[in-house]
Structures are given as structure tokens and as C-alpha cells.
Amino acid sequence: MTKTIGYVVGIIGILFLVASVKPVNTIFVGFLPLLKGIATYYLLGAGIIILLVAIVLLRGSGSGKQPAEVPIYQGKNVVGFRRMGKKRRR
């Protein structure tokens, strides 16, 4: 769930960055008159901050694909299971 929210926030941040470009801003003002009073550098700053929040959300969410336990083989036979914990950062 957190990964999905991170992607959505990232797309919103990219839209803010795109809206900060002057030719695109004039197109956006036609659709959203609210943007007329906002300076482009405010949009750029907001876009950067929103993208940083998205990066934090995406890095904080795990991939979820790592199994909790992996089998230990001896030849073709499974002799036990190893618990996989979180990897420690160095």
C-alpha cells in the first residue's frame, strides 16, 4: 500500500515540476486558473519537496517478495528452514 502511495505522490511531484516550466505553465493556467497567481519557482520548490517525500515513501516500503523462510537442502532433501530477517545497513 505504501508503495502505491509513493508512486502517486511521485507522479504529483512530477506534474508540479512540469507545471513550473513557463510554456507548460501557460497551458496549465488555461485549465486551472488557480495557478495564475502562483510563481513558477514556488511550483518548482513544491515539486522537489513532493518528489523527496515520494522517494522516502518508496525507500521505506519493502519489496515484499522476500520469503520469510527459505529451505536448507542437503542433497535433494530439505533438512530445515532458515528464517530470513531484515538486512542490516552498514
Image (cartoon, rainbow, N blue to C red):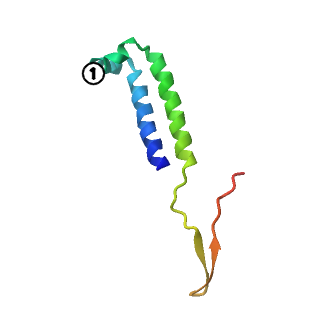
Quadrant assignment, res 16:
top left
Is 61 situated above or below 47? below
Q: Is residue 72 left or right of residue 48?
A: right
Instruction: Give x and y (percent) for residue 71.
Output: 59, 77
**Amino acid type shown at disc 1:** Phe
Is 68 situated above or below 72? above
The secondary structure type at the circle numbered 1 is: helix
Q: Residues within 10 Å of mark 1 (few under 14, many from 20)?
A: few
Q: Residue at x 42, y 14 (%)?
A: 38
Q: Is residue 5 left or right of residue 84?
A: left
Q: Residue at x 50, y 31 (%)?
A: 50
Name, please, the residue furthest toward the left: 30
Instruction: Give x and y (percent) for residue 3.
Output: 48, 48
Q: Residue at x 35, y 19 (%)?
A: 25
Is 37 situated above or below 76? above
Q: Residue at x 47, y 27 (%)?
A: 47
Is 82 situated above or below 4? below
Would you name the residue on which mark 1 appears? Answer: 31
**Total number of numbered labels?**
1
